[in-house]
Image (cartoon, helix red, strand yellow):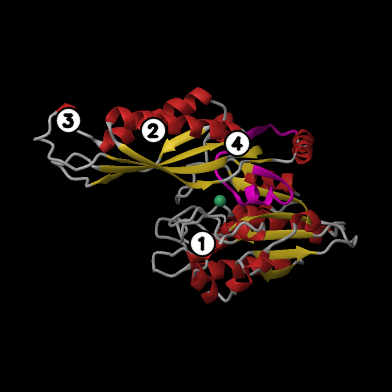
Amino acid sequence: MINKERLEHRIEALAQIGKTKDGGVTRIALTEEYRQGLDLISEWMQEAGMEVKLDQAGNLIARKEGTVPGLKAVALGSHVDSVGNGGKYDGTVGVIAGIEVAQHIKEEGIPNKRPIEVIAFCEEEGSRFQSGGVFGSRAMTGNLTEEDLNVIDSNGDSRYEVLRNFGLNPDNMAKAIRSGGDEFELYLEMHVEQGPILIRENVPVGIVTAITGLSLTEVTFEGGESNHVGAIPMDLRYDALLGASETALAVEEIVNKYGGNAVGTAATMDVEPSQVNIIPGKVSTVIDIRDTDLDRREAILHELKKRVKEISERRKLKNEITSKLKANPAKSATHILETMKHKSKELGLKTYEMPSGGGHDAQLMAEITDMAMIFVRSENGSHNPKEFASAEDIKLGDRFIS
Ligand SMILES: [Zn+2]
């Protein structure tokens, strides 16, 4: 059986590394705390009978060979980096549960035909370089660009330098690329839900049907001179903030019209000069639109651009639209979903099928192999110290990836 006490104990032990005063965790990728975290899980991986190595992108990879030579590996994974003052379950449960599966196989003497890998992906959160995250899985799937190594953290150190200081060789980054078709049979990731749906449905485990595709678009309005608020009559002003505000409302309206799993947010509003007495002259807003359906997301973006143009013309503002980031949605493999549904019947367990609104390493892994994810019910959202998932629920989730 999956050992619930050991799961619980390991989650607590890992949470001691980078523990914050209010009980959260700050374990930013490629820091000293991160190294200590990797050292601890390396010990557990070895205890589970696996060989451990760190690839050139900082992904920690444990492997247990199979009994039949030449078969492709089953990979389990997630991440152990955190955001600043984050929770102790986000990412860690997937890695620790993967190790538990391997250890269970070892202790029960179950012969595994296929190799098993447990992967702790590097810098999933993206909080160090503010660069969208999933760095390690992008490296493994061959999705890095030159720019990814040049980004700078808050100390002014580039990712290239930081990787070097961690003992890695970024010039050899291509060595981290895995050829999924030959190497992996499938990839499974268990993660806390980070949302309220499983609690609302009173179900411990969610089966993830697809991972949403994120897009970030920056829209900037300029109204010319930032004039005195008192001196300019209402019909003679070019207020950039009003253009951006209308755009934010348009995001809500358009996304609601398309429906489905689409969500849209005008997430930031950068106002210049942002002073009392002055009409806002230049305003940028970064708009986040996500959907599990790529065509629908693109249709929403297309309509939004038309709307920005219409707002600009009517308000006599200049506008600039820049696409900052686009990730493709990923669908879970049908045959794994079927197996998981079967499993829930076998366990007599109610599960809930749902899309993932957050990005995960699994999204990248879907580019090179069949993928599926399990969500575990979690309280108090995520990325904060109050995030909580019960050991009982985590154990139930683990049975779906074992
Ligand atoms: Zn995570």
| Kind of residue indicated by mark 2 | Val
Per the rendering, the mark at residue 236 is 3
123 to 240, vertically: above or below: below
- In the picture of the structure, the residue carrying the numbered disc 4 is 294
> Can residue 362 be found in the magenta stretch?
yes
Q: Is residue 236 left or right of residue 190?
A: left
Q: Are marks 1 and 3 in contact (CB under 8 Å)?
A: no
> Can residue 161 be found in the magenta stretch?
no
3D distance between C-alphas at marks 1 and 3: 43 Å
Counting residues from the start of the chain, the first of labels 2 and 1 encountered is 1
Please provide the residue range marked out in magenta: 348-374
Counting residues from the start of the chain, the first of labels 4 and 3 encountered is 3
| Kind of residue indicated by mark 3 | Leu
- In the picture of the structure, the residue carrying the numbered disc 2 is 308
Residue 322: x and y in percent read 43, 45
Q: Residues within 10 Å of mark 4 (few under 14, many from 20)?
A: some
